[in-house]
């Protein structure tokens, strides 16, 4: 233990830069924190100790006064530029295109086909005697068996056809309904992705704030240990304290320097993660604004469960998949109907003699598979089992949502209780600093006690910030569990 002699005869301030005379106006890191320390008898009119915590808060806030990235800004940027959200938006656009494609199948289908043929043998048409009727006078025509051919000339057959589906319209409309459900499912997935990204941004933002708070508290402790190392070093030379005391201080100083390096690396990694969520360059520099104070509102578990069942995207997605399975079964049933179409077309054989140039007409086409060896029956049974599966998944989604809400609610209440504890500890350490400083003024306490108490205040402020940010993170998770953005 060490004690500063009264003969020093100087008023000192404990500030971020170390110990300085109160009369020295040289700025130290933008702010001096006067604690009213006097090393000889007398009085000093410094800043009251009850304002020490406020001064520390102002020091932290001044760093972020300009160009600070707020949580709302980070969330807005993520929703606008996040690549996963953009992909889900593109999936909705693809679903819209699929619906329009399915709708075109209700319209007439136009088809043109052509076949060019080089025969290996002559194409012959044989007409038997009298096969074309009788001439006047009762003479058969032709009068004898006749063969007419086109030789080896190339031949082409051209067909043009227009068909309007009739019985297929039921299947086409069910297909459109299925694609519409796919679009709604894509929209639900987009909403879920937005909520997930929002939650990730909040957690990453609060993680940066937590690390910054820990780093700020550690840097304050580092400055105090450097000052203590300087003072103890002088007293080791003067043989006022033991060399072991000086080594203990140096060990603590080295540990603080290591922890500072580790936290700075952690902070850099967390900022890169937040940049990735925002869709920015990984190495883009930014500062985050400190978390504001908040009111610890109470939450009702039953109301939260009801809201989650109404808004959670997972449950909506499960219900849409159940509807899709039902539509798919109806679509499979519609395959039992024969395909009947109204058809109009023309046929033109080119390169053949003694045949009509074109054949044009209108009619009805029919396609039906009356016997399929039980294939459609098994496909229908498969669709029915899929409906049962989706119903089970819907009930499971409801259960999982309720479990998630209950878990997040409990974690939120725990974080709220911890925040109240941190508030009480912060108030207690500030009061201890006031008492220790008063004792030092009256020369009934050591200066080392003042330094230790001030370090405890910085640690209590850090613990409060950690508890506050833990509460905000728990609240963000709870809001996600409710299905809120």
Image (cartoon, rainbow, N blue to C red):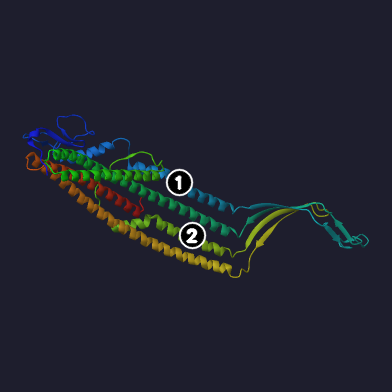
Which of these two is toward me, 396 or 218? 218
Q: Position of residue 469 (x, y in %)?
A: 27, 48
**Residue 121 location, quadrant:** bottom right
Would residue 349 be visible to someone looking at this image?
Answer: no
Residue shown at 61% from the left, 52% from the top: 107
Residue shown at 37% from the left, 46% from the top: 273
Disc 2 target residue: 324
Disc 1 target residue: 86
Q: Is residue 255 left or right of residue 113?
A: left
Mark 1 / mark 2, whichever is N-terminal: 1
Q: Is residue 453 left or right of residue 347?
A: left
Q: Position of residue 110 (x, y in %)?
A: 66, 51
Q: Position of residue 341 (x, y in %)?
A: 64, 58
Where disc 2 sits, the SS reads helix
Asked if the residue under mark 2 is in contact with the one under mark 1, i.e. CB atoms within 8 Å, the reply is no
Residue most toward the right?
A: 137
């Amino acid at each position: 233990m060490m004690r500063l002699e009264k003969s020093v005869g100087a008023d000192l301030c404990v500030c971020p830069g170390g110990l300085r005379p109160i009369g020295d106006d040289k700025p130290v890191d933008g702010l001096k924190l006067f604690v009213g320390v006097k090393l000889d008898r007398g009085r000093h009119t410094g800043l009251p100790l009850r304002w020490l915590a406020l001064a520390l808060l102002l020091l932290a806030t001044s760093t972020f006064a300009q160009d600070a990235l707020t949580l709302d800004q980070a969330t807005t940027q993520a929703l606008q530029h996040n690549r996963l959200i953009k992909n889900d938006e593109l999936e909705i656009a693809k679903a819209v295109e699929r619906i329009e494609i399915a709708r075109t199948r209700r319209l007439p289908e136009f088809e043109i086909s052509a076949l060019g043929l080089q025969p290996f043998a002559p194409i012959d048409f044989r007409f038997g005697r009298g096969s074309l009727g009788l001439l006047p006078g009762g003479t058969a025509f032709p009068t004898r068996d006749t063969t007419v051919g086109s030789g080896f000339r190339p031949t082409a057959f051209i067909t043009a056809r227009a068909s309007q589906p009739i019985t297929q319209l039921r299947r086409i409309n069910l297909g459109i309904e299925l694609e519409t459900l796919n679009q709604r499912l894509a929209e639900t997935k987009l909403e879920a992705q937005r909520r997930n990204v929002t939650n990730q941004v909040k957690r990453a933002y609060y993680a940066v704030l937590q690390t910054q708070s820990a780093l700020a508290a550690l840097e304050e402790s580092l400055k105090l240990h450097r000052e203590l190392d300087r003072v103890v070093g002088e007293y080791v030379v003067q043989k006022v304290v033991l060399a072991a005391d000086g080594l203990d201080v140096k060990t603590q100083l080295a540990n603080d320097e290591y922890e500072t390096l580790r936290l700075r690396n952690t902070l850099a990694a967390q900022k890169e993660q937040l940049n990735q969520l925002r869709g920015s360059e990984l190495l883009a520099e930014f500062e985050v604004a400190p978390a504001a104070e908040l009111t610890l509102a109470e939450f009702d578990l039953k109301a939260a469960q009801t809201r989650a069942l109404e808004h959670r995207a997972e449950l909506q997605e499960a219900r849409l998949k159940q509807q899709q399975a039902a539509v798919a079964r109806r679509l499979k049933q519609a395959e039992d109907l024969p395909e009947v179409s109204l058809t109009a077309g023309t046929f033109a054989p080119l390169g053949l003699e003694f045949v009509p140039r074109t054949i044009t007409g209108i009619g009805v086409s029919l396609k039906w598979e009356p016997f399929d060896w039980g294939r459609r029956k098994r496909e229908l049974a498969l669709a029915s089992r899929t409906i049962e599966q989706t119903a089970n998944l819907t009930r499971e989604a409801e259960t999982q949502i309720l479990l998630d809400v209950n878990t997040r609610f409990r974690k939120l209440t725990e974080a709220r209780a911890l925040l109240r504890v941190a508030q009480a500890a912060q108030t207690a350490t500030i009061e201890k600093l006031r008492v220790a400083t008063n004792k030092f003024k009256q020369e009934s306490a050591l200066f080392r006690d003042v330094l230790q108490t001030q370090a405890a205040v910085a640690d209590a402020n850090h613990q409060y910030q950690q508890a506050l940010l833990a509460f905000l993170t728990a609240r963000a998770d709870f809001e996600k569990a409710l299905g809120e953005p």
